Structure formats: C-alpha cells, structure tokens
Amino acid sequence: NAGVTQTPKFQVLKTGQSMTLQCAQDMNHNSMYWYRQDPGMGLRLIYYSASEGTTDKGEVPNGYNVSRLNKREFSLRLESAAPSQTSVYFCASSASPGAGANVLTFGAGSRLTVL
Amino acid sequence: KQEVTQIPAALSVPEGENLVLNCSFTDSAIYNLQWFRQDPGKGLTSLLLIQSSQREQTSGRLNASLDKSSGRSTLYIAASQPGDSATYLCAVRDFNKFYFGSGTKLNVKP
C-alpha cells in the first residue's frame, strides 16, 4: 500500500520556467491537498480538492494552478516559477468527513528550488 | 479564521522524562484534531487522531487529549527516548480544511 506518492522528489528550475508536481493516492480518498512548507512559516495550504471534479483556493494560491485529474490524482502546476516559490511541497489526502477515520496522510514531499 | 498555536516552539529534555506538548485553537467547532511527527527533511507522519466527540486517544507511549470547549489539546509522551526527537505538529479539521500549528521541536538528550 503506497499511500500518497509525489513526483519529483527534487527539482531545480530557472525563473520563468514551468513545471508540474504530480500526486497520486491509492486509499480511495475523496479529498486531496497541496501544501507548501517554509522555515518559520509552517504549513500553508495552496489548493485543495474536496472531491473529484472540484478544486478550491487555500491561503496562498497565487502563482499556482491545480488539476484533479481523477479520484486518485491531483497535480500542482507552476506556470512561471519565481524564486519566492522555492519551498518544500507536500501533497496530502483524506477521506471525507463522516467517511471513515479521516486521517490526513502526507506524501514524502517535493523540494523545489527556483534560481 | 481558525488559528492554531503550539507552545513551546522548542523543548529539550533528558532521556526518560515524561513531557507534554500543547496545542490551542481559537474556534471550537472542529471536526477532529490530529497530531503529527516530522523528522528533518521528511514528510509528516500521523501519530494520533481524536474525533470531536472523543476526549483522548492512546498509542503506546503517546496519549493525546482534547478539550473542545477550552480549545486545547495536549500530547503526552511517556518515558521519552532520543528517537522521539522530531518536530510535532497538531492540526484541526474544519470539515474540508486542516489548520496547522507551527510545531514544537523536541530534542531528547541521551
């Protein structure tokens, strides 16, 4: 049981380049999330998807787009990377409220550096 | 907006001590509360989840309590070990969203 799988684990970009972070979960969870973690700032929600076909902005959505491709997959795209987007990105998933234990399960993280 | 605070930000204790980590939140209308552990350079690992209707959960040397009315949760670690050294984060669920504290960095000295 792989849980939440993120790719790539590491990426270096130049300012202005684009890239997509991929996330897949195999726990049949409805809800999926993208967070970024920066020193001194804690975990901040970028976007989330409460169910297949829906996406909503979190605290820090500017500069990002997301796609909920199907129930398993939720991708995060940086269209024109900026140095301020240098961070560690985490994907997470959970069952919907009332549908099981609702444990929030995280992927291993993707470390992105924008030069 | 829900605000989650964890105190202290850092804690250093000798091995074998029992210790308590604190988490407070501003809005008591939560769905559940979860405690996580994060090792340096790693992802978050779930330790305990307490549903809003529960008062506590236990797993091994860990015990988490929840007092919704006062907006507080504690994580009790018994007989601490050097392997417990990590950052501990709490998160409250507000239906679809999770709100995280900044964490308590724990160092257990041999």
Image: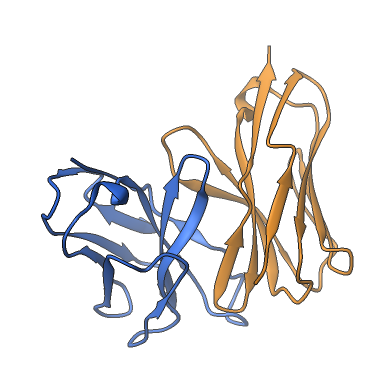
Chain colours: A blue, B orange
Give B13 or A72, whichever is nearer the viewer.
B13
Q: Position of residue B14 (x, y in %)?
A: 76, 16
Q: How many marks?
A: 0
Q: Quadrant of residue A10?
A: top left
Position of residue B81 in the picture relative to residue B95 (left or right): right
Residue B34 vertical position relative to residue B42 in the rendered view, above or below: below
Q: Quadrant of residue B86?
A: top right
Residue shown at 47% from the left, 67% from the top: A59
What is the residue that sits farthest to the top in this orientation? B110
Quadrant that contains the N terminus of chain A: bottom left
Q: Position of residue A51 (x, y in %)?
A: 41, 84
Q: Position of residue B78 (x, y in %)?
A: 80, 33
Give A98 or B1, whichever is nearer the viewer.
B1
Residue B61 vertical position relative to residue A35 in the rendered view, above or below: above
Residue shown at 30% from the left, 45% from the top: A86
Position of residue B70 in the picture relative to residue A75 (left or right): right
Q: Position of residue B83 (x, y in %)?
A: 61, 25
Quadrant that contains the C terminus of chain A: top left
Position of residue B9 in the picture relative to residue B28 (left or right): left
Give B58 or A109, whichever is nearer the viewer.
A109
What is the residue that sits farthest to the bottom in this orientation? A53
